[in-house]
Amino acid sequence: MTDDTARAAAILKEHRESIDRLDAILVYTLGERFKHTQAVGRLKAAHDLPPSDPKREEVQIARLEELALAADLDPEFAKAFLNFIIQEVIRHHKKHQA
């Protein structure tokens, strides 16, 4: 193994370790988020409120697009990601109302 290859392997290892840490942060952050959305779902069900709030969803998507731009992340990806999460939250809210 050349010195360049060894350096590249070391840098690759560092990047992968960072990615692994960030993946863990994402998973735990999503877990926390869903704890709150589950509580919202129970509250909505208890007070006969609709499982979705299109106005809030629209505001959240716009907010996330701004955050994505600030973070140098593709806003379309961020929007698709949030839409996926919102659909999952609505699915959970509907289960609480059933």
Image (cartoon, rainbow, N blue to C red):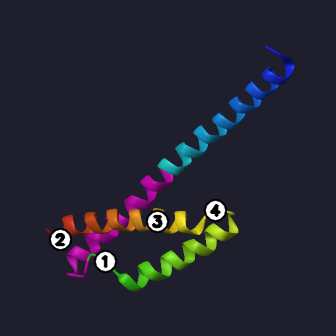
Which element is circle 1 on?
Answer: loop
Q: Cα distance, mark 4 to mark 2?
A: 35 Å
Q: CA distance from mark 1 to mark 2?
A: 12 Å
Q: Closer to the N terminus: mark 3 or mark 2? A: 3
Judge whether 88 appears above or below 62 on screen: above
Who comes first in sequence, dot 1 or dot 4? 1
Dot 4: few (<14), some (14–19), or many (≥20) neighbours within 10 Å?
A: few
C-alpha separation, residue under disc 1 versus residue under disc 4: 27 Å
**Residue 27: x percent and y percent?**
48, 48
Q: In what element is the residue under mark 4?
A: loop
Query: In x, y percent, where is residue 68?
Result: 62, 67
Of callouts 3 and 4, which one flags the residue occurring earlier in the amino acid sequence?
Answer: 4
State the quadrant of the N terminus: top right
The circle on residue 52 is: 1
> Label 1: few (<14), some or many (≥20) within 10 Å?
some
Which residue corresponds to mark 4?
A: 73
Number of the front mark, 1 or 3: 3
Circles 3 and 4 in contact, beta carbons < 8 Å? no
Furthest residue in direction right, as rendered = 3
Between the residue at mark 1 and the residue at mark 3, the CA separation in whole angstroms equals: 17 Å
Q: Looking at the image, which residue is at 69% across and 63% down?
A: 72
Q: What crowding class fits label 3: few (fewer than 14 Cα within 10 Å), some (14-19), or many (20 or more)? A: few
The residue segment tinted magenta is 28-50
In this image, 41 relative to 11: left or right? Answer: left
Q: In the rendered image, which residue does mark 3 sit on?
A: 80
Q: Residues within 10 Å of mark 2 (few under 14, many from 20)?
A: some
Q: Secondary structure at mark 3?
A: helix
Q: Return the residue at label 2.
A: 97
